[in-house]
Amino acid sequence: MALTLCATARLAEALRSAVPAGADGTWETPAAFTVGAWLARLVEDAALDGSGPTLRLLDGACERLLWEQVIAASLPDDALPLFDLAGLAAAAHEAHALALIWNLELPPAALAEEGRLFVAWRREFRKRCAAGGWTEAARLPEIARSLIAAGSVPLPAAVDFAGFDRYTPEELRLRQTLGERGVRVGEYPAGAMPATARHRLACDDAQAEALAIAAWARDALAADPDARLGIVVPDLAERLDALGFALEDALHPEILAPGAPDSPRMFNISLGRPLASQPLAAVALDLLALGVSPRHEQAVFSALLLSPFWSAGQGEADARARIDRALRDELEFFTDLPALQRLVKRLYAREKIEAPRLAGHLEAFAATLAQGGPRRRPPSAWGTVFLGWLEALGWPGDRPLSSPEYQVRRSFLAALEGLARYDELLPAVGAGEALRRLAALCREQVFQPETRGKPSIEVLGILESTGLTFDALWVAGMNDDRWPPNPRPNPLLPAEIQRRAGSPHASAEVELAFAAAVHRRLIGAAPAITFSWRRQDGARLLRPSPLLAGIPEGAAQPPRATPPWPSPARLESLADARAPAVAPGEKVPGGTGLLKAQAICPAWAFYQYRLGARSLRPAVEGLDAMERGTLVHGALEHFWRGVADRAALLALDAEALAAAVAAAVTAALADFEDSSHRELPPRFRQLEAQRLERLLRTWLAVEARRQDFAVLACEQDMLLDIEGIQVRTVIDRIDRLADGGLAVIDYKTGHRIDTRNWAEERITEPQLPLYAALAVPLAGGEPVAAVAFARVSLDEAGFSGVGERKDLLPGITGLDDPKRKAFPAADFPDWPAVLRHWQERLRAVAAEVGAGEASVRFADPKALLYCEVLPLLRLAERAAALPGPEGAP
């Protein structure tokens, strides 16, 4: 049986598994290998029997590391941060291999500056290889060919080459050497078949093309369940998810059922993903980073808490989700492991949130780190240390792993062991460098789960399809910007030398010739072939590949693939605009926020306040806007508790005022740290104190220009019953004015508040109207004469609001102003009319809450800007289901 040397490992595997069993039920596996695998075996066998040299081959990762070291040594220390060493090493690695395989001569006169640098690097690289006794992989074909030429290795009688769209000079020299040694060299029968049905198809965009492919595959298998289908995509890496999802929807709708995601598929995608992107491996790398660096962004801890792949990820999932929520509220943007441990203990003491296995694994990990050891070790030693860290943290979790997850775990453990390959090049490194090398190994290693059975559909890249045949074939993405591919010559080698040699990606002519050869091969790969291209990519118009010229247009675009969902026997309609009424004794939290949400959109109020849905707080560095506002409220409260009225404010000289402001700010910061369980960094605390002091001085200058007033209450807490709804309010401040009336003031440090809605049917800013019309009167206070927002800011400090008279507070609208627009005199002849309007409207909104009104309706979509439950309103689905004014947000 002849030896077959294949262009790809996939073709070699296909040839080895394609031979049918003989009459006695046995068969001989064909000898089919890639050229590289066969030559490596020849060299290894020659070394074992003493007829050839024993080589110390550098694998790709070690060779790139050696290039990094060579390049770094050639650059000044202060210039190293300016260079992408890993990228330069990869380019040098490729350039060196091209020069060897394509026999590129590099005369000094033809070299630009980057070429001269590469030649110097290459000289040093070879010197280090010789000193270490290493051999780079690109030299293996030359070494094996010399053994063949010397007759040092046994050779088969015949060698057939299969699936080569083009030969490198080294492969041509190998063919010649084999022939000179008496081996019959031939081509493996291509098995080409005439394409009896061949057409091209234009699709609207990438998504339409994916759906059309899925529909074609579904219909082809429905017509012939034993058919072997091929889908070839030049840009498969970019189309992987869209095409995979479309095929799953069309062929495997059952995967949405519990336990079904890992069930066998009718299709196999040849392109894997980096091991580092697999969730199980990614979590392992993040866990190891906790031991390397003490502080990390809050988002790192949040993602780890929500991952099932360590500690009791399944058994304590609910508790860990609650810890994650508290993490966002109580820990700093950059936090560390001890802070997380303290939070877990605090939540157990405060809320009885139990996560004993999580706490135990964190303590075990902290104890492992505390054991210390040498700060610098060989990479292999760090592999052992890293494994101990992962075991202390309970990786890979408490639930059984699926088959693909088990394979990921096995590959990651192999990568840990693979750190030993760096020992000679990196005798001793720190933990950070070892983890960086491990992460690089995981990024470079392509992981693909083992295929179970023989799927009916093969999804392949252009190169993987070499030499394979199918019953029907779809070649996608045949646009002129993708096929032929754009040239990308190696930047370290002269472009002209690469063009003359015809090396891969050297020029547009080289890529066109290669694409034409592949195109001819694809046409013979199946009797029925569809070539598809996309008309546009977003707003960019696209054109078909010139290689599609002469292929007739298809009759029509296939229908889009739709999941074969079973039709239910009976449909039940349920009106979701009405929720259950508030039961007697039921407490609805939210305070004035509840009434505000109900007035803007009843569904918002129902989801957020009655069902308790809320968005998770995003992590911010430092303090967010709400926390800064809390500090301003606290500082003003402390100030006015010490300075009771305007007269006392004016009596303070500059020094006394500065001292009073500083004392108020200090007290507010202390209260904040105590309530939030956070200790602000000293420098940050100092800067925040300076900001607050400046802000308070700016605001107090506004207060000093008012008429006489006295502060009666600060942060007044009240519980109101409005139409059976319990509403808790906190009034920032109540002042007694010069004429004896009351003013209710609410501090605002953020955006401007539109007070014009106070005169409308639905009051979307109910806070001050509620205080004035219901809270203060129910508390037995005197009638309120004015309500105002105090804009405490550096650039727009002032009041905005409404009062019985415009002179009660500077800048507010007064009902005695004939030019007022917000409260027309016809509807609001006097101040009691305003208060009655507020009472009626607020009670009506509260009655809606009590009755269970929960429809999705709103007047202005901008009012939903701060809605925490916006996804639950499903505005996009509503717009699609109800076209026109009803569905428009």
Image (spheres, grey):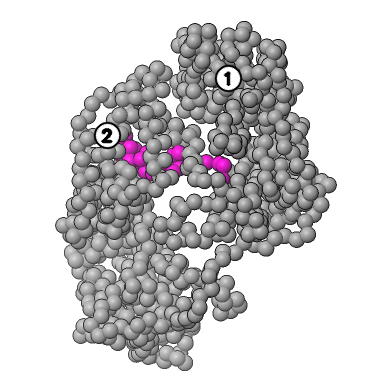
User: What secondary structure is the stretch in magenta mostly built from?
Assistant: helix
Identity of the amino acid at label 1?
Leu
Viewer-nearest residue: 247 or 237? 247
Region in magenta: 268-292
Magenta stretch holds residue 269: yes
Asked if residue 536 shows in the view, the reply is yes
Q: CA distance from mark 2 to mark 1?
A: 39 Å
Q: If you read the primary sequence from the N terminus, does the residue marked by circle 2 or circle 1 appear first?
A: 1
The answer to whether 330 appears left or right of 539 in the picture is left
Q: Nearer the viewer, mark 2 or mark 1?
A: 1
Viewer-nearest residue: 518 or 488? 518
Viewer-nearest residue: 230 or 675? 230
Residue at the spot 54% in from the left edge and 15% down from the top edge: 43
Residue at the spot 45% in from the left edge and 11% down from the top edge: 132
What is the count of numbered marks?
A: 2
Query: Residue furthest toward the left?
Result: 349
Which image quadrant for residue 279? top left
Viewer-nearest residue: 754 or 55? 55
Q: Position of residue 656 (x, y in %)?
A: 21, 56
Q: Position of residue 851 (x, y in %)?
A: 35, 86
Callout 1: few (<14), some (14-19), or many (20+) C-alpha neighbours within 10 Å? Answer: many
Callout 2: few (<14), some (14-19), or many (20+) C-alpha neighbours within 10 Å? Answer: some
Mark 2 touches mark 1? (CB < 8 Å): no
Residue at the spot 48% in from the left edge and 26% down from the top edge: 61
Residue at the spot 50% in from the left edge and 43% down from the top edge: 451
In the depicted structure, whether residue 261 falls above or below residue 194: below
Q: Could you tell me which secondary element the residue under label 1 belongs to?
A: helix
In the depicted structure, whether residue 337 falls above or below residue 666: above
Residue identifier under label 2: 388
Q: Quadrant of the N terminus?
A: top right
Residue identifier under label 1: 39
Magenta stretch holds residue 60: no
